[in-house]
Amino acid sequence: TMKVVTYLLNWRKPELLEGENSVSKLPAVIRSKGIDNVLVVTDNGITSLGLLDRLLEGLQHEDINYVVYDRTIPNPTITNIEEALTIYKQNNCQGIVAFGGGSPMDCAKGVGARVANPKKSIQQMKGQLKVRKEIPSFFAIPTTAGTGSEATIVAVVSNNDTHEKYAITDTVLIPHVAVLDPLLTVGLPPHITSTTGIDALTHAVEAYIGRSNTEETKKFSKEAVTLIFENLNEAYTNGTNIEARKNMQRASYLAGIAFTRAYVGYVHAIAHTLGGFYGIPHGLANAIILPYVLEYYGTTVHKSLAELSDLISLGTRTNTDAQKATNFIEAIKQLNASMNIPTKISGINNTDIPLMVERAMKEANPFYPVPKILSKQDMFQLYQQIKE
Ligand code: NAD
């Protein structure tokens, strides 16, 4: 019982700093925690754009030492985590700042898990509740609006040697502070805006239709779905619209809060295999797979998708749930198409499918409260459908 109580108490939300230029407020918050030496985890796309500058100036201003690790790759690897950990230790850091999309945030979570457990490898912490010990103070600054990692208990990491992509899940990985500064996302290129935005939509939808949803997660999912349909295309076509960027950041955060409590489903299980095997960006994979899986679920999800369809005023009151669900799936397809997201995934090798099916089923079936359990045969069919 004690373990369960501690676990539930730990299921916190990050302290939020929100709004334009809120990143400038973070250094004082770090200082107020008595920290004067941090590791900043990011990627070289971000450093080359100069996006870190305001943060680094602020840290200097507060007399906080920092060292930057910027070699994180999309779908971050165990190697990334170990490299960043070495730098953390060499510099006697006391806290971790993640600056970037899901990849730097998850890499940073991995570093935190390793600092807390110097004797456990990342591989040994795979799965649920294996980190356990408190990680160092952890500050997350998302620069994409998609993963929600700034609010979640999950780090998704890849093993280059085995092509595995798996989750480390523990409440201690929830960032202590998250910064939602829309100015950091205005330069996000359209193709990343679109796919990461649909990643957030996937979180909201999978959390909503799954069997572990609660009143709270349903509310957050609905808010996220509404915000995404109202703002994503605008953020894609008019990237400097701060209001649209702010709303997408909010949507991504809310979807993160929802899915970290209610979990995801087959869309994610399949996307993770494609990330592990071919490095296909997570958001892109989710965007393409989402409509296929929703269609595959069939009648089981008609009622819940009809509820989501009502949020964005698709169809009329006289439509049946089945019609509304179809309209909702159609609306996702249209949103994808309007942002030039393809309908199929190229580069899937037939010979890889059996192992991917096995891994996706292993990820989904014990862990995800999916609306309907799919068979091995269903999964083979889904891979054939999404394959170019
Ligand atoms: P990403 O972090 O991989 O970044 C993609 C690219 O966008 C990079 O090249 C980066 O340099 C660039 N970029 C980021 N912000 C930018 C900006 N503001 N301006 C210009 N370029 C910018 O992408 P992502 O989709 O945010 O993260 C994907 C990873 O997150 C995957 O590994 C996925 O599995 C994981 N993920 C984690 C969670 C979680 O809860 N932990 C949830 C969903 C996905």
Image (cartoon, rainbow, N blue to C red):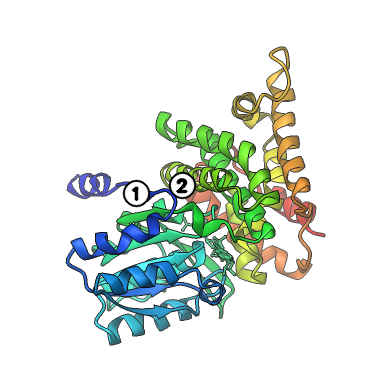
Whole-percent x, y for residue 260 in the image: 43, 47
Q: Residues within 10 Å of mark 2 (few under 14, many from 20)?
A: many
Residue displayed at 28% across by 71% down: 61
Whole-percent x, y for residue 102 in the image: 50, 62
- The answer to whether the residues at label 2 and label 1 have Cβ atoms under 8 Å apart is yes
Q: For ligand 1, give the image quadrant.
A: bottom right
Residue 253, numbered label = 2
- Give the number of the mark in front: 2 or 1: 1
Which amino acid lies under the numbered mark 2 shown in the image of this protein? Tyr
Residue 16, numbered label = 1
Whole-percent x, y for residue 50 in the image: 51, 73
Residue in front for this viewpoint, 118 or 123: 118
Q: Is residue 47 above or below residue 221?
A: below
Residue in front for this viewpoint, 307 or 36: 36
Whole-percent x, y for residue 237 in the image: 71, 50
Q: Secondary structure at mark 2?
A: helix
**Mark pair 2, 1: CA separation:** 10 Å
**Of all residues shown, which one is farthest toward the right?**
388
Residue in front for this viewpoint, 97 or 255: 97
Residue displayed at 78% across by 55% down: 342
286 left or right, relative to 24: right
Residue 179, numbered label = none
Q: Secondary structure at mark 1?
A: strand
**Of all residues shown, which one is farthest toward the bottom?**
90
249 left or right, relative to 300: left
Residue in front for this viewpoint, 151 or 134: 151
Quadrant housing the N terminus: top left
Which amino acid lies under the numbered mark 1 shown in the image of this protein? Leu
Quadrant housing the C terminus: bottom right
